[in-house]
Amino acid sequence: MEFAVETRGLARTFGSKRAVDGIDLQVPAGSFYGFLGPNGAGKSTTIKCLTGLLRPSAGDIRILGIDPVASPVEIKLKVGVVPEDLALFDRLTAAETLSFIAQVHGMPAETFKTRSADLLSLMDLTAAATTLVTDFSHGMRKKLALAAALLPAPRLLFLDEPFEGIDAVASRQIKELLHSFVARGGTVFLTSHILEIVERLSTHIGVIADGRIVAQGRIEDVREGAHGKGTLEELFIQLVGGERPAADINWL
């Protein structure tokens, strides 16, 4: 099987804290991979290592068969990233943002013109193309960040909480676009706390807890291996040991 993302013994420490503790990831090419875990489990640290924002303390990484530590520029030309904080330039317009991305990638002018028009239309941002990003709503910013990530036609997308804080209309637009991206052979690596969306979109999942992978594979296989039944939320709670007695606050 060809893997879009593969790690062996990936670890990242901060002082004495081991945020990511020797994980082995296997993300099949052409899959929609949901990366799940409770707060503080190591999800964001893992993504930062995979996308070159953090240098691993130990272990090996292969992104599309390439070592991102040894060849960071080559990887950045083939991968799209939407970080949780979006990393947009507030004093640029939407059109200027896409133009900047195109110039970084050395994109021909005609290619940029066609692709940017398509993406702005798809994201319902055409009328806001000359508006400064600082004046965008949160949902508009999310859609622009996704458009910027898709503009170079990457083979792999890393999405950190892309559905958090956006309305139902924007959420549906993004889900349909991601389905189309995967159907055309792309790979999506997604983190989200909205498990209903992950269950609806993902073909594969990986679950991390306390910096370690506790389950990974096709959703059906993970559910069967954990003897899980019901929703992904119930399976997730079972895997990360999240069962708690019901709160009993007698003054409420």
Image: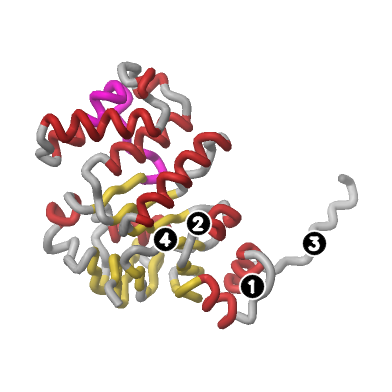
The answer to which image quadrant residue 108 occupies is top left
The answer to which image quadrant residue 85 occupies is top left
Q: Earlier in the sequence, mark 3 or mark 2?
A: 2
For label 1, the SS is: helix
Residue picked out by circle 2: 201
Q: Earlier in the sequence, mark 4 or mark 3?
A: 4
The answer to which image quadrant residue 190 occupies is bottom left
Tell me the distance, in whole angstroms, between the alpha carbons under discs 3 and 1. Answer: 16 Å
Q: Amino acid at mark 3?
A: Ala
Image coordinates for residue 152, horizontal then vertical, percent:
21, 43
Q: Amino acid at mark 1?
A: Gln
- Asked if labels 4 and 2 touch by Cβ distance under 8 angstroms, the answer is yes
| As drawn, 88 above or below 13 | above
Asked if residue 183 lies left or right of residue 58, the reply is right
Tell me the distance, in whole angstroms, between the alpha carbons under discs 2 and 1. Answer: 21 Å
**Label placed on residue 246:** 3
Q: Earlier in the sequence, mark 3 or mark 1?
A: 1
Q: Earlier in the sequence, mark 2 or mark 4?
A: 4
From the image, give the main secondary structure of the stretch colored magenta.
loop
Q: Image point 48% across, 73% down: which residue?
A: 218
Q: Image point 27% across, 73% down: which residue?
A: 2
For label 4, the SS is: strand
Image coordinates for residue 109, horizontal then vertical, percent:
12, 30
Range of magenta residues: 83-98
Residue lying farthest to the right in this orientation: 250
Residue picked out by circle 4: 32
| As drawn, 111 above or below 8 | above
